[in-house]
Amino acid sequence: MSNTYDYVIVGAGFSGLVLAERLGSKGHRCLVIEKRDHIGGNCHDRTDRNGLLYHVYGPHYFRTNSEQVRTYLSRFTEWREVQYRAQVFTRNRFWSFPVNLATYRQLSDNAQATESDFKRYLAENVVPIASPANSKEAILASVGEELYDLFFKGYTSKQWGRPAEALDPSVCRRIPWRSTVDERYFLDEFQALPKHGYHTLFDRLFDASGADLRLETDYREILPYLRFRHLIYTGPIDEYFGHCYGHLPYRTVRFELEERSVRHTANGFLQPALQINYPGSEPFTRTVELKHITGQVSAYSNLVREFSEEYRAGKNDPYYPVPGQESAALIERYRELTVRETGVTFIGRLAQYRYLNMDQIVGAALHTFDKLEAAPPTPGLVTPMRNIARVQVA
C-alpha cells in the first residue's frame, strides 16, 4: 500500500465514501481511514443469525426530495420503496404518531372526531409563542401542553439527557404533526431502503472509488507517515483540534439486539409498527423492528432497543451533536479555527456539528466535490494538524 496520496479521507461514512468515489472518478489517489472494523459509519447494517437484516447503530430511514441525490445513489443500489411508520407506547397503550387526527381521536376517546374538532382543540391549547427560544416552547407553540407532556417531555429528556427547555428549538421542530389522519412519519417524495442493504451500497461505492482503505486505524497515528495534498475530515470537530476549547456535548446510543421466533404471533411481528417510542420510565428510548419494511419473510424477527447515554471521549462513540446554549458559543470558536486550517475540508455531522439527514450529507459531499475540483489543492501544500505532529505532504 502506498503512502502518497492526493487526498486522505478520515471517516468511511456517507461523506467520506461519496467523496472518495467522486474524487477517484477523476483519477485522484485517495486513502480512506476508518477507526471501526467496517465502512458505512452509523448507517452500517448486517444480518442476524437468522438471516434478517437490522441496522447496527439504530434505524436509518433514507428519504429525499433531491433528484440529484437519488440519481447519484441509484448508480450503486436498487431501492425498496417504503413508508416509515412509528407509534408511541405510553399510558399502557399504543398511540398513533406523529401527532395527527387519529392521535386526537384516541386522546378524546371519540372515534368520530373531525379535523375541525382537532383544529379547535389545538386553537384552545397551543401556547402563543411567536419565536420559540427552545424545544419545549417549539412544541407548546405547535400542539400545546397536554400533548407535550404525553409524548415529548419524557422522551426528549431521555434522548438528550437534558430537558427540552435546554435544547435549541430546531431539535423538536424536526418532529412533524398533522391535522389529518396521516400516520406517515415523513412526507418526502422518495422514501426507501437500499434493496440489498446499506452494506452493499457502501461496498459498491468504495469499489468504484479505487481508494485504499485502512480499517481499525486512528488517523492521528498514521498521518505523520503519509504524504498527501489535502485532508478531508469527517470526525468530531473538537477532537481534531485536540479539545483545545473543551469538549463539545454529544449524545451516544447503546443498542441491544433481541432475536426471537414469531411462529406463535398473529402476524409474524413482535410489535405493531416499525418503530415504537417510549417516553415513560423505561430505560430505553425506542425499539425498532426492521422486518416491517424489509419485506423479508421468516419465522423469526428481531428488535433493536436503544439506550441514549452521555458521550464520554475514549469510552464510546459520539452520535448526535447537542444544539443548545451550552454548545452554541463553543462550536463557533471551533468553526473559526476551521477557516484558518488551510488544506483541510471539514464535512459531515460531527465535523460540522450539525444534525444532518442522510440525503443532506450526500448532497453536501457532492457539492464539496464540485468545489474541490474547481479549486484543487496546491502541490506542495503543508497541511497543519494542531493535535498531531505537522506532516510534510507531497
Image (cartoon, rainbow, N blue to C red):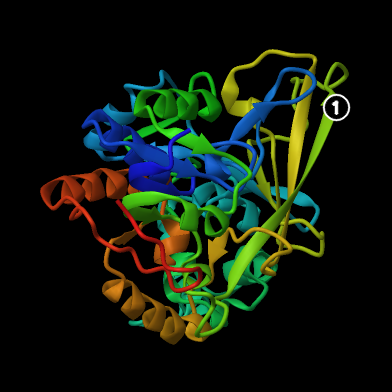
Q: Quadrant of residue 300?
A: top right
Residue 323 to residue 221: above or below: below
Front residue of this view, candidates 365 and 300 = 365
The reply to whether residue 82 is in sight is no
Determine whether the residue tagged by mark 1 lies in a helix, strand or loop.
Answer: strand
Q: Amino acid at mark 1?
A: Arg
What residue do we see at 43% from left, 23% from top?
204
Front residue of this view, candidates 104 and 18 = 18
| Mark 1 closeness class: few <14, some 14–19, many ≥20 residues within 10 Å | some
Answer left or right for 216 relative to 189.
Answer: right
Please tell me how many numbered marks the rendered image carries. Answer: 1
What residue do we see at 42% from left, 23% from top?
207
Front residue of this view, candidates 53 and 122 = 53
Residue 169 pos. (x, y %)? 44, 74
Residue 290 to residue 367: above or below: above
Residue 36 to residue 150: above or below: above
Q: Which residue is mark 1?
A: 260
Residue 72 pos. (x, y %)? 28, 30
What residue do we see at 46% from left, 68% from top?
237
Residue 238 pos. (x, y %)? 50, 72
Q: Quadrant of residue 334?
A: bottom left
The reply to whether residue 192 is in sight is yes
Residue 90 pos. (x, y %)? 74, 57
Answer left or right for 196 relative to 353.
Answer: right
What residue do we see at 33% from left, 33% from top?
21
Answer left or right for 44 relative to 94.
Answer: left
Q: Quadrant of residue 141?
A: bottom left
